[in-house]
Amino acid sequence: MVKYLNQLDDCIEENAVAGRLTNIKDLLFGFCTDCMGDFVFNQPLGLLRNQKKKHIVKELNRALSLLGPLSPTPWLLHIAFKLLPRVGVMKV
């Protein structure tokens, strides 16, 4: 993990030296994905250093933004299944 922390630090430093703004969201996503790839899959994914794979980050962010409003749906279904059987028992 220290290797990926050093790469993250290098990316931020490169942007600072070049006078560019740092998109920390993309860098942290790459950092987390690289750590996960190393620990879970035992192979580097290289999203933090490889600029060619940035389209993967954009596509994943776009897909997650579509799923964001639907995230409470499973909880609403659980609540509905727990409450609906009791509605018929209540007398109006």
Image (cartoon, helix red, strand yellow):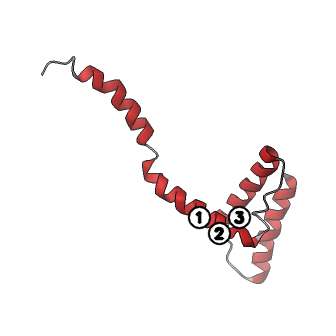
Q: In the shown orientation, is residue 72 left or right of residue 50?
A: left
Q: Which residue is at a point 53% across and 63% down the rendered structure image?
A: 62
In x, y percent, where is residue 59?
59, 64
User: Which quadrant of the view contains residue 8?
Assistant: bottom right
Figure quadrant of the C terminus: top left
Give the number of the mark in front: 1 or 3: 1
In x, y percent, where is residue 41?
79, 47
Q: Mark 3 points at which residue?
A: 27
Q: Badges 1 and 2: C-beta atoms under 8 Å apart?
A: yes
SS class, disc 1 = helix
Q: Which mark is residue 11?
A: none
Name the residue type under label 3: Leu
Q: In the shown orientation, is residue 59 left or right of residue 24?
A: left
SS class, disc 3 = helix
In x, y percent, where is residue 27?
71, 64
**Distance of mark 3 from mark 2, alpha carbons?**
13 Å
Name the residue type under label 1: Glu
Q: Mark 2 points at which residue?
A: 55
Q: Name the residue under label 1.
A: 59
Q: Badges 3 and 2: C-beta atoms under 8 Å apart?
A: no
> Crowding near pointer 3: few (<14 within 10 Å), some, many (20+)?
many
